[in-house]
Amino acid sequence: MPALEWIGYLSTVGVYGDHGGAWVDETSACRPVSKRSVMRVAAEQEWLKLGRAIGKPVAILRLSGIYGPGRNALANLEDGTARRLVKPGQVFNRIHCDDIAGALWLLAENNLGGIFNVTDDEPAPPQDVVAYAAGLMGIEPPPEIPFETAQLSPMARSFYGENKRVENQAIKAAGYRFRFPNYRVALERMWAEGNWRDGEPRSPMRG
């Protein structure tokens, strides 16, 4: 690939593993728990190694939980699939798909390499996100379910085995400004524009 100028690899904040709810940044130790995150760490290292070998910048984008039109608490509430699972002290990190695209574009356009956490400013308990979405829709949120009694798939349960708050200062230092710095801004925008389902404007609660 003689025209190759830049390499970007979309990884996951899952490479950090569990840090007991503490803040982590790009210099924090990777302690992956799941097999898929172990494989991500190995893939990151291989891409960085390739970049050094060919003298090209490699950007590793560690993404948090992705949401956007069609994949969000508003859509889940409309479908009747939203649940409020409560595990004391548990938070998750999130990123809107538009901010993933924006961060990619910034790094690619400027041929910037390095490791970047691509996550918004506000790690939050998952039940709070569902409750906020229900408030926007003017409906009662689903009841809280204790994590210990919840029926979950092994993969879903594995996500609750990791608890950390992920910093995003590196991507900001590179010049990126988030369109959706927290879940409230994003949910408010999607609800106001009526595009929480598929990106296309629609009337609220239309089937």
Image (tube, helix red, strand yellow):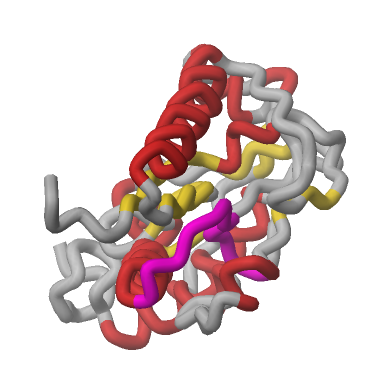
Instruction: Name the residue nearer the viewer: 106 or 24.
Output: 106
Residue 57 x %, y %: 41, 55
Q: Does residue 43 appear left or right of residue 120 in this picture?
A: left
Residue 155 x %, y %: 49, 19
Residue 179 x %, y %: 46, 82
Q: Is residue 130 visible?
A: no
Q: Is residue 111 magenta?
A: yes
Q: Is residue 127 visible?
A: yes
Image label count: 0
Magenta range: 110-121
Q: Does residue 38 appear left or right of residue 165 in this picture?
A: left
Q: Is residue 67 above or below residue 150?
A: below
Instruction: Name the residue nearer the viewer: 111 or 82.
Output: 111
- Please identify the quarter of the rendering in which residue 135 is found: bottom right
Q: Does residue 69 appear left or right of residue 28 in this picture?
A: left
Taking the view exactly as shown, the residue that stands out farthest to the bottom is: 192
- Please identify the quarter of the rendering in which residue 202 is found: bottom left
Residue 92 x %, y %: 65, 47
Q: Does residue 97 appear left or right of residue 24 in this picture?
A: left
Instruction: Name the residue nearer the viewer: 153 or 176.
Output: 176
Q: Quadrant of the N terminus?
A: top left
- Which residue is pictured at 52% across the width and 48% down the height? 62
Q: Quadrant of the C terminus?
A: bottom left
Q: Is residue 163 magenta?
A: no
- Which residue is pictured at 46% across the width and 42% down the height? 52
- Which residue is pictured at 65% across the width and 66% down the height? 170
- Which residue is pictured at 50% across the width and 22% down the height? 42
- Please identify the quarter of the rendering in which residue 201 is found: bottom left
